[in-house]
Structures are given as C-alpha cells and as structure tokens.
C-alpha cells in the first residue's frame, strides 16, 4: 500500500521508574531512560512500514542531531524520507515522556510548526493511495490549510485518515470539524470524542461523527476500541492483555494496525482487532516504535486474540 504521512518529526526522551512524581522545587531520580523516535506521525509511519506497507513521510526537521536521528530511525524502519526537508534555520522538536503505567508529556514543538499544507504538492499526492495526518494542535503551520489539503487528496482519489490528538493549548474549537468533511477514517480517544461532540456517551458520540463517507473510531485504552459499521451498528473490540512497560505512542500504533487492515478491505471488526493488537504490542518496549509488530507477529497475535475473544 502506498501511504503518505504528513506531519511532525521529533525524538522522545522517555524517563521511567521514577522514585517519585516530579514536583516544583524537588528533584527525583529516573532509574531508566531511552531516546526513541517520537511524534505521532513518525510512530504511525514506522508502524505501517513494519507491517509491510510502502510508506513515505513529508515533513520538516532541523538540520541537527535530533533531526538526523529521526531520519535515521525512519530509514531503518524502511520509511521513505526523501520528502522531508532538513532546514538549518530550525531546531528539531523534542518530547520528554515521563512514563509509568501512564505517561506525562512535555513537548518543545520546534520544526514541527514549520510544515505547511502547500508543502504537500499535488505532484506528491498523486503518487499515493492514502494520506494520514496526526497531531493537529501541535502543527500550527499545517493546521490552517489542512481542510484544503484533505480536499485536494480526495480529489486525486486518495482516502484520508485524521487523528487530531491531544490539545496542549486547551483551545479545542469547532474549526477542527472543517477537516472532517474529507476524512475517510477519524481516530479519537474518549476525551477527544467528548470535546468534539459534547457527549460523554461513546455510542452517541460516534453517531454524531460518522457519516456515509467517514468512519469514526474511538480508542478506549484498557477497554479496547469501538466504531460504527456501515449499517449503523456499534462494533466493539476488547483490549488485549499484555505486560505494559510504556504506553507512549500506543494510539499511533493502533492507527497503523487499523489502517493496515482497512486499506486491504478487511471488515471493520478485524480492522479494530488489528488496531488493538498493534497498539497493545507497542507498549512492551520503551518509546512508541521499539516493540511495534511486524506482519507475521500481527497475524500470530490475531489468531490467539480472536480465539480468546470467542
């Protein structure tokens, strides 16, 4: 599958096994750390490539140590980075992830704010079947032109997927709905679903977002995932049991697993299971990419997962 991911690039500095929760005026100790490929876009691209898809990233990075690290990590995952611009005038962003069973994130956006919708030319779009975008609120340069970019993609015959992600500025507004018009698959978690629809009820929220041309998918963490099928019936898939080390990027690996299945025409329930398996397996390692599944592991885990779910 030819898939284009447009978005931010940054490393994650993951700190684990803290002696206490950090507080102002105090110092705590982390017993372990890792520097890993971060950013929602890059983690999803890596997950898709490891599953055997033909994936490229278009984005902007600084011509610095962190930028080169991201490009090397993506290249090692067999992601095409020829459309990533390295700009010496920019500093590549960084996320510090303080991780335990859940995680707290601190992000310096840096170059992730530099990508513009116009940087994704029609001549690039026509080479792909699908376009994915994540981290809407962190990409201030891409955000204004994103509805138009999705409209251009659909006009060229591409399907699209969109995961807005967390809003660190707490300014979630109705303008995000402009992107939904040309979104084929919309990914959200429970909080984002409620912010968008005004409903804390999963089924009601999904019904408010799903249309004839948009599949709405909600990621429920330890409760699995849910989506509306074409007949208006809620499909639910339970979580998969796994020894969790770090949840960083699990939602982005879910997106990769779901899209891997959906783009192959697999039914909605199986696409949800693929998402749950890929998201769950990614939590076994530090960072979002270290423990991502390949196609063989996905297939093996799907068989076991489906057997236990009967």
Image (cartoon, grey):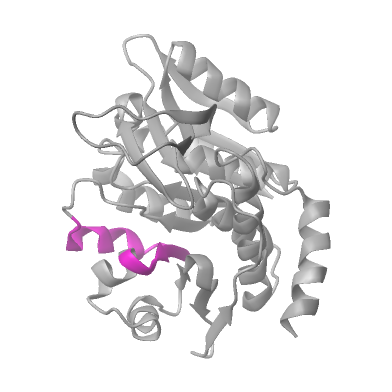
Q: Is residue 267 above or below residue 35?
A: below
For residue 281, say whether it is visible: yes
Magenta stretch encompasses residue 155: no
Looking at the image, is 226 positioned above or below residue 247? below
Q: Position of residue 84 (x, y in %)?
A: 49, 25
Camera-side residue of 244 and 66: 244
Residue at 47% x, 69% y is 220
Q: Would you identify the image quadrant in which residue 202 lies?
A: bottom left
Q: Which residues are drawn in magenta?
A: 172-191
Q: Position of residue 170 (x, y in %)?
A: 18, 52
Q: In the picture, which quadrant includes the C terminus?
A: bottom right
Residue 212 on image: x %, y %: 45, 80
Location of residue 155 by image quarter: bottom left
The residue that appears at 67% across and 46% down in the rendered structure is: 292
Q: Please name the residue shown 71% across and 46% down the image.
A: 53
Residue 8 is left or right of residue 126, and the answer is left
Total residue callouts: 0
Residue drawn at the location 42% of the way across and 22% of the way down:
61
Using the rendered image of the protein, determine whether residue 12 is visible from the camera's viewpoint: no
Residue 51 relative to residue 74: left or right:
right
Residue 165: percent from the left, percent from the top?
36, 53
Q: Is residue 284 left or right of residue 19?
A: right
242 on left or right of 131: right
Nearer to the camera, 58 or 152: 58
Between 279 and 7, the residue placed more toward the observer is: 279
Whether residue 130 is situated above or below residue 25 in the rendered picture: below
The stretch drawn in magenta includes residue 186: yes
């Amino acid at each position: 599958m030819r898939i284009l991911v447009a978005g931010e690039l940054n490393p994650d500095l993951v700190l684990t096994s803290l002696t206490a929760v950090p507080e102002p005026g105090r110092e705590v100790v982390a017993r372990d750390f890792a520097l890993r490929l971060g950013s929602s876009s890059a983690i999803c691209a890596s997950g898709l490539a490891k599953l055997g898809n033909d994936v490229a990233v278009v984005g902007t990075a600084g011509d610095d140590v962190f930028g080169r690290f991201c490009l090397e990590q993506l290249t090692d995952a067999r992601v095409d980075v020829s459309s990533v611009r390295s700009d010496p005038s920019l500093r590549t962003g960084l996320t510090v992830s303080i991780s335990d069973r859940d995680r707290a994130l601190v992000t310096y956006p840096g170059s992730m704010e530099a990508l513009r919708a116009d940087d994704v030319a029609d001549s690039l779009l026509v080479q792909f079947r699908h376009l994915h975008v994540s981290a809407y609120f962190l990409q201030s340069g891409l955000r204004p032109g994103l509805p138009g970019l999705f409209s251009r993609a659909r006009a060229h015959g591409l399907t699209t997927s969109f995961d807005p992600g967390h809003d660190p500025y707490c300014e979630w507004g109705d303008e995000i709905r402009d992107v939904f018009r040309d979104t084929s698959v919309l990914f959200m978690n429970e909080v984002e679903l409620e912010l968008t629809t005004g409903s804390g009820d999963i089924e009601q929220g999904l019904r408010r977002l799903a249309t004839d041309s948009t599949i709405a998918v909600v990621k429920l963490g330890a409760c699995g995932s849910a989506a509306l099928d074409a007949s208006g019936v809620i499909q639910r898939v339970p979580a998969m049991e796994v020894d969790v080390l770090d949840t960083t990027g699990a939602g982005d690996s879910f997106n990769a697993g779901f899209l891997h299945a959906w783009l192959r025409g697999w039914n909605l329930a199986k696409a949800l299971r693929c998402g749950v398996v890929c998201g769950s397996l990614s939590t076994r390692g530090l960072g979002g990419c270290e423990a991502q599944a390949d196609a063989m592991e996905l297939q093996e885990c799907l068989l076991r997962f489906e057997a236990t779910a009967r």
